[in-house]
Image: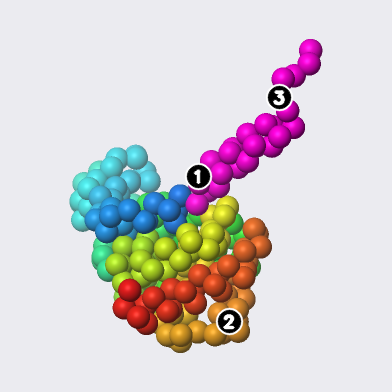
């Protein structure tokens, strides 16, 4: 049966579908361009659930979990918890001793930006967070090593109005396509802007050398960061 759809119509339809897919993939960046209140709401998770690994009972805070063990499972080892400060909020996170910071961000905190698993071998940079202001691979750092340190994720940067120009320039230059590498690039981008103020293209490339972009938008990252630097310098 002959089709009435021309090659031009088919390609036009495919193009629209591609735009839709790209829009979904870039949601992590595009969504932060809403109101500042909406950005702030995604920066932290404050309603944590602590789970007893013996019987599965949930408690609202860690102290309640400890009391549950004392009364219901006397003698059993209480699950380990660590005090983490993430995006300015400090809380007790229930963790396993072997959990990486990436796993903790995802499973204990509920932040998904830098916590999605990509290579999980410290080779791609997509899980990069800032620890005490310096980029670190969250898949290669244990959560228990981060107690007392300041952790910042892409969600926290997005919630800071001062860095809105960075996200706007990433959208403008289409530096985010599939979206997997974007959170890691954005956290390192903040480090670059903080360290250099007005970074050169070579400085940006050197600092982003550990961040792989599987869509190959490397030159766009440079353009986006330099434009953000100009906006921040001008107070826009």
Residue 19, magenta (yes or no): yes
Q: Secondary structure at mark 3?
A: loop
Q: Quadrant of residue 17 in the image?
A: top right
Label 3 and label 1: CA atoms lie apart by 27 Å
Q: Which label belongs to residue 5?
A: 3
Q: Are marks 2 and 1 in contact (CB under 8 Å)?
A: no
Name the residue carrying label 2: 201
Q: Residue at x 78, y 16 (%)?
A: 2
Q: Position of residue 175 (x, y in %)?
A: 55, 62
Tell which circle, 3 or 1, labels the residue nearer the N-terminal end.
Answer: 3
Tell me what residue is drawn at x 54 percent, y 85 percent: 200
Question: Can you say which quadrant of the picture contains the C terminus?
Answer: bottom left
Residue matched to label 1: 24
The single residue placed furthest to the top in the displayed view is: 1
The answer to whether residue 114 is above or below residue 12 is below
Confirm whether the magenta stretch covers residue 172. no
Q: Estimate the x, y position of residue 75 in percent, counting from the top left.
A: 30, 53
Q: Position of residue 190 (x, y in %)?
A: 43, 74
Instruction: Indicate which label's residue lies in the foreground, 3 or 1.
Output: 3
Q: Which is more toward the observer, 127 or 187?
A: 187
Q: Nearer the viewer, residue 32 or 54?
A: 32
- Label 2: how many residues lie within 10 Å, few (<14), some (14-19) or many (20+)? some
The residue stretch that appears in magenta: 1-26
Classed neighbour count for the residue bearing mark 1: other residues with Cα under 10 Å, few (<14), some (14–19), many (≥20): some
């Amino acid at each position: 049966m002959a089709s009435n759809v021309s090659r031009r119509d088919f390609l036009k339809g495919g193009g629209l579908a591609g735009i839709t897919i790209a829009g979904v993939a870039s949601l992590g960046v595009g969504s932060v361009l809403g109101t500042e209140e909406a950005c702030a709401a995604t920066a932290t998770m404050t309603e944590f659930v602590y789970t007893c690994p013996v019987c599965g009972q949930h408690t609202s805070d860690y102290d309640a979990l400890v009391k549950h063990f004392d009364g219901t499972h006397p003698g059993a080892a209480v699950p380990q918890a660590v005090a983490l400060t993430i995006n300015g909020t400090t809380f007790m996170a229930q963790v396993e001793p072997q959990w990486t910071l990436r796993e903790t961000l995802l499973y204990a905190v509920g932040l998904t930006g830098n916590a999605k698993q990509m290579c999980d071998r410290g080779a791609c940079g997509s899980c990069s967070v800032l620890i005490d202001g310096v980029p670190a691979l969250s898949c290669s750092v244990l959560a228990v090593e981060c107690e007392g340190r300041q952790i910042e994720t892409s969600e926290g940067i997005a919630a800071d109005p001062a860095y809105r120009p960075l996200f706007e320039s990433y959208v403008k230059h289409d530096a985010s396509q599939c979206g997997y590498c974007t959170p890691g690039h954005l956290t390192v981008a903040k480090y670059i802007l903080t360290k250099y103020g007005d970074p050169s293209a070579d400085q940006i490339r050197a600092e982003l050398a550990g961040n792989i972009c599987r869509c190959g938008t490397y030159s766009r990252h440079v353009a986006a960061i330099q434009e953000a630097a100009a906006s921040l310098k001008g107070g826009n």
